[in-house]
């Protein structure tokens, strides 16, 4: 009778432990979510640092030679056009033309 009781007790223990989660040593599941959150925050901070450094070391104020030459050429062309328009709209009266001749 005692042998049957021990066998039944072992069967009940085996049956209940089959449905219980197995303990895993060395790995904690509760901290994985905090680790992932920490990684996400670290990546956001790294992006922000990279943006700041990019702005700090960015070259400013230097125009290329090509752009500078375009500006010079366009200003010269604009001046020539303004002179031409001024010549077109200058009026010479007939009296002034007779006095000069």
Image: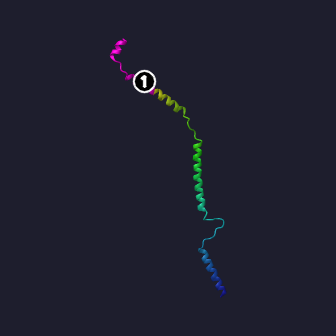
The quadrant in which residue 55 appears is top right
For residue 40, above or below residue 61: below
Residue 88 is a magenta residue: yes
| Residue at x 41%, y 24% (from the top left corner) | 84
Q: Nearer the viewer, residue 47 or 25?
A: 47
Dominant SS of magenta comes to helix
The quadrant in which residue 14 appears is bottom right
Image quarter of the C terminus: top left
Residue 65, position in %: x, y?
54, 31
Residue hosting label 1: 83
Residue 40, position in %: x, y?
58, 56
Q: Nearer the viewer, residue 56 or 43?
A: 56
| Residue at x 64%, y 80% (from the top left corner) | 10
- Mark 1 surroundings: few (<14), some (14-19) or many (≥20) residues within 10 A: few
Residue 12 is a magenta residue: no
For residue 11, above or below residue 67: below
The quadrant in which residue 6 appears is bottom right
Image quarter of the N terminus: bottom right
Q: Nearer the viewer, residue 62 or 13?
A: 62
For residue 35, above or below residue 83: below
């Amino acid at each position: 009778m005692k042998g049957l009781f021990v066998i039944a007790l072992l069967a009940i223990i085996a049956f209940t432990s089959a449905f219980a989660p197995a303990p895993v040593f060395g790995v904690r599941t509760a901290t994985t979510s905090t680790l992932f959150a920490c990684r996400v925050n670290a990546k956001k901070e790294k992006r922000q640092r990279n943006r700041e450094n990019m702005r700090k070391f960015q070259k400013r104020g230097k125009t290329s030679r090509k752009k500078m030459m375009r500006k010079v050429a366009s200003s010269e062309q604009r001046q020539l056009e303004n002179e031409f328009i001024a010549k077109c709209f200058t009026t010479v009266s007939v009296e002034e033309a007779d006095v000069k001749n």
